Image (cartoon, rainbow, N blue to C red):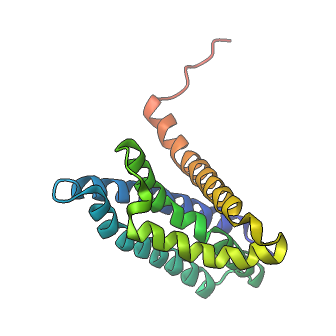
């Protein structure tokens, strides 16, 4: 048996972690701009926020695996964690990419961004070569960025929409 309530709670926490990583990275890089160049700020902030996101996701997964949930729920959570770890890491990365875009700078000058891209490519290239052949690595990287961004935006929207609705106030009563 799989506990859908527990899965929904963990996916909500995933969404909050993605949004938190994005916002915290963006704010920290902007604060870092007061003291250093954009790429220096990005290279200083990204390792910390990426490590924080991984630790938070790992802690949530460990707590779920140690909980009294059913083995089926734990197995689904483990598969989801493996599937969603790269999109989750893209939250802080996309904040840095967005800031570089608005500053009209190339994010590829960031050593941390380049290292993460190389690391992810080392994971994706063998999978791509095994499944599709080696010529599609750049396409897969672009696809990964798109999918990770879409997953992050959807999870953020799902998490933030109830808050926005509460801020806008209750729906007007209908007259009968």
* Residue 27 in the figure: left or right of residue 76: left
Tell me the quarter of the image containing the C terminus. Answer: top right
In front of the other: 108 or 91: 108
Which residue is pictured at 75% across the width and 64% down the height? 136
Classify 112 as above or below 21.
below
Which residue is pictured at 78% across the width and 75% down the height? 129
* Residue 115 in the figure: left or right of residue 38: right
In the rendered image, the residue lying farthest to the bottom is 66
Which residue is pictured at 47% across the width and 69% down the height? 114
Q: Position of residue 82 (x, y in %)?
A: 66, 76
In front of the other: 43 or 11: 43
Q: Position of residue 48 (x, y in %)?
A: 35, 73
Q: Quadrant of residue 14?
A: bottom right
Tell me the quarter of the image containing the N terminus. Answer: bottom right
Which residue is pictured at 43% across the width and 48% down the height? 98
Q: How many numbered marks have been drawn onto this rendered protein structure?
A: 0
In the rendered image, the residue lying farthest to the left is 35
Q: Position of residue 73 (x, y in %)?
A: 73, 76
In the rendered image, the residue lying farthest to the front is 135
Classify 80 as above or below 34.
below
């Amino acid at each position: 048996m799989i506990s859908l309530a527990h899965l929904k709670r963990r996916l909500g926490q995933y969404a909050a972690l993605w949004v938190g990583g994005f916002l915290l990275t963006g704010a920290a890089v902007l604060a870092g701009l007061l003291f250093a160049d954009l790429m220096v700020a990005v290279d200083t902030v990204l390792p910390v926020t990426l490590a924080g996101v991984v630790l938070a996701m790992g802690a949530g997964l460990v707590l779920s695996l140690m909980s009294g949930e059913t083995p089926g729920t734990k197995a689904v959570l483990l598969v989801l964690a493996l599937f969603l770890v790269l999109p989750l890491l893209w939250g802080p990365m996309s904040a840095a990419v967005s800031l570089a875009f608005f500053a009209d700078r190339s994010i590829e000058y960031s050593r941390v961004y380049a290292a993460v891209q190389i690391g992810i490519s080392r994971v994706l290239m063998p999978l791509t070569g095994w499944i599709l052949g080696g010529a599609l690595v750049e396409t897969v990287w672009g696809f990964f960025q798109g999918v990770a961004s879409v997953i992050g935006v959807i999870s953020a929207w799902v998490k933030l929409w109830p808050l926005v609705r509460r801020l806008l106030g209750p729906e007007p009563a209908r007259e009968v």
